[in-house]
Image (cartoon, grey):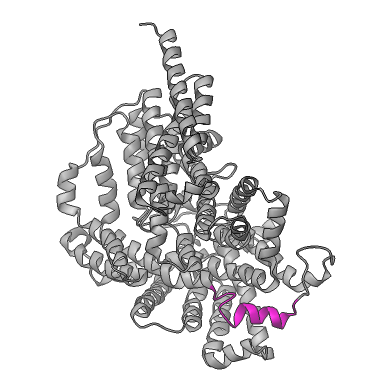
Amino acid sequence: MTELSDREAELVSAHEQERPARQLGGPLRLGVWIVGGLLSVYSLVVVFRPVEALEHRMTFLAVALPLVFLCYRSGWSSFLPRLFRRGTAASPPPETPAGGEPEGTRRSERPSVADWLLAAASLAVLVYPLLDIDGFRDRGSGAALTDLDVVAGLALTVLLLEAVRRTVGWSLTIICVVFLIYAYYGAYLPIDWTIGHRGFDLGQIVSQLYTGTEGFFGVPMQVAASYIILFTIYGAVLDYSGASKFFIDLSFAAFRKSRAAPGRTVTTAGFLLGTVSGSGVATTVSLGSVAWPVLRRAGYPKEPAGGILAAGGIGAILSPPTLGAAAFIIAEYLRVSYLEVLLYATIPTLLYYLGIFLAIEIDSRRFSTHAVQVDAPKAGKLLLRFGYHFSSLILIIVLMALDRSAFQSVVIATAIAFALSFLDPRHRMGPKRVGQALAKGTLEVLPVTAVCAAAGIIVGVITQTGLGLNLSAIIVDFAAGNLVLTTLMSGIAVMLLGLAVPVTASFIIAAVIIGPALTTLGVTQAEAYMFVFYYAVLSEVSPPTALSAVAAAAITGGNTYKTMMMTWRYTLPAFLVPFAFVLTPNGQALLGQGPIGTVLLMTAVSAVAVAALALATGGMSGWPERALAAIAAVLLLFLEPVPIVAGLAVLAVAVAVHLVRSRRRDPA
């Protein structure tokens, strides 16, 4: 995204699950950016000159992990007594010299000696196996690890836990520690417990996590080192080439005259900015800084405006062609192309935005909003001058449709975006901008890399102990084998998990535990993983935390709880549609699976259901018709002939009741 102001950066750091990075300066900043840029170059080169999987992932982490310790604060000072704190927020603010920054600010941003030692240790334990990768792999597969192997593996485990704590907080760190304790002490659990196992010693645990592709260097790490880094580089190039500004300007220019235009503009801008940012909170904040003044002038109250901002921001993770990091993991787990995952997400995305647009249309009437004149060029003029920014996005889809890999497609699209930047003198990507974009691509992937590597602890332990199948059996048994109850429990569990850990980690954990519970009851893997994906993402707009909604409330100054509820209302279709493609036989049509006629029909029926939901949550004034509209929406989402007919009939009754009651209230 475009460079955030200090206020925007403060909001992102306060409400994003990822922790803010240090503000480095001087030669150290330059050195970090050079190393980050070189890692991006390495990632681009590997696309066309592949490296063996374990070696590639280990090399990538050997560069990324030291950067985490240099770029992210330890935060340990918050646990020390006030007497020993120095330069923290709890201390009195330092004096500001005339014409300069507060003294000590620059020093407080420097990595400590401990940070440098951790960075060096990270490099050592990851370079060590690379010196003899074949021998290291053989020792792991033959259970013949040396004492040095075990020590290095344990050290890497501790380093990853610290890296995760720095970047995303304590929750995921504690979860990883619990899984490690379970692997080591599982033999001490009562023999009649389903989750008990024979127990594993340190050497066996290290062998599982460190020496192959089942632990630290498993599928999540593969996704970070291949898919995500390439897309962050692409997003950075788009950003530096001026695409972010164009997307916002185009959104404001496209909707000028109607009273619902400001709300639609914000939602559209959020969708377009999703190609540059994979963070719901960051998109919400960046969008809010520009859009909130417009929404306020249009007459939107603070809470509905915050709801629109948060709903538009979370669309950055739900929307093709980039989606979020979890979508790349789906492609790897299902062993399908990323294009197929994009197809899975297309219809749910359309329904998501349909729900938002309908709710905005309803609210524009309820709040008597009005059109706002925005100083922006006409849409046609913008498209003629800067429409080339869309070409690289379209090219990604076209190349994947022509059987190019997602890796090659995004690299080629990045090159095209770079070349097209020379059409705009203000955003021409010379050597300096190229270097900044490459460095930014790496620096933005650091938190995700730490999460993916640490998530390997969870996946590795689950695989080694068989915990995934055991927990899946417990879930199914608790639900008495009922698919509806199992799905409801799964959705709640994923949302609760998402309140504590980032979307990517939430998806990984839920996919290996809840996914098998759904597939055991006849749900396909694609349906199960997409269900988990949507509920992992929706945790960002789910009370009581609702990070995107909290950030939006901070921008508008609205009541936080009311903003959360407005966000929930705008995003309601995204909560219900996933149940449709899990619980109903025709639900697979919403993932683009099946005959084209069935897909179109089920999409149309689902669109009517979304419209019924919009009426139930705000389009009708009386509770009788609202209740009828809600019942109609649920019936329609069964996607079977009899419920569809019944749903249409109930919806017709709801509309009739609404019209009759409206005429009675207003005879004129």
Residue at image coords 46%, 81%: 56
- From this viewpoint, is residue 25 visible? no
Q: Position of residue 55 (x, y in %)?
A: 49, 84
Q: Is residue 340 left or right of residue 371?
A: right
- From this viewpoint, is residue 429 visible? yes
Quadrant housing residue 353: top left
Question: As rendered, which of 69 and 660 lies closer to the eye?
Answer: 660
The quarter of the image holding the C terminus is: top left
Q: Position of residue 315 (x, y in %)?
A: 41, 48
Q: Position of residue 656 (x, y in %)?
A: 43, 18
The vertical placement of 250 against 645, above or below, is below
Q: Position of residue 541 (x, y in %)?
A: 51, 44
Question: As rendered, which of 287 and 458 lies closer to the eye?
Answer: 458
Spot the residue most to the front: 642
Q: How many marks?
A: 0
Q: Is residue 362 left or right of residue 184?
A: left
Q: Magenta residues?
A: 200-218
Question: As rendered, which of 492 and 559 lies closer to the eye?
Answer: 492
Based on the picture, tell me whether residue 205 belongs to the magenta stretch: yes
Q: Is residue 205 left or right of residue 105?
A: right
The vertical placement of 221 against 541, above or below, is below
Based on the picture, tell me whether residue 590 belongs to the magenta stretch: no
The vertical placement of 372 against 49, above or below, is above
The quarter of the image holding the N terminus is: bottom left
Spot the residue most to the top: 667
Residue at image coords 71%, 63%: 470
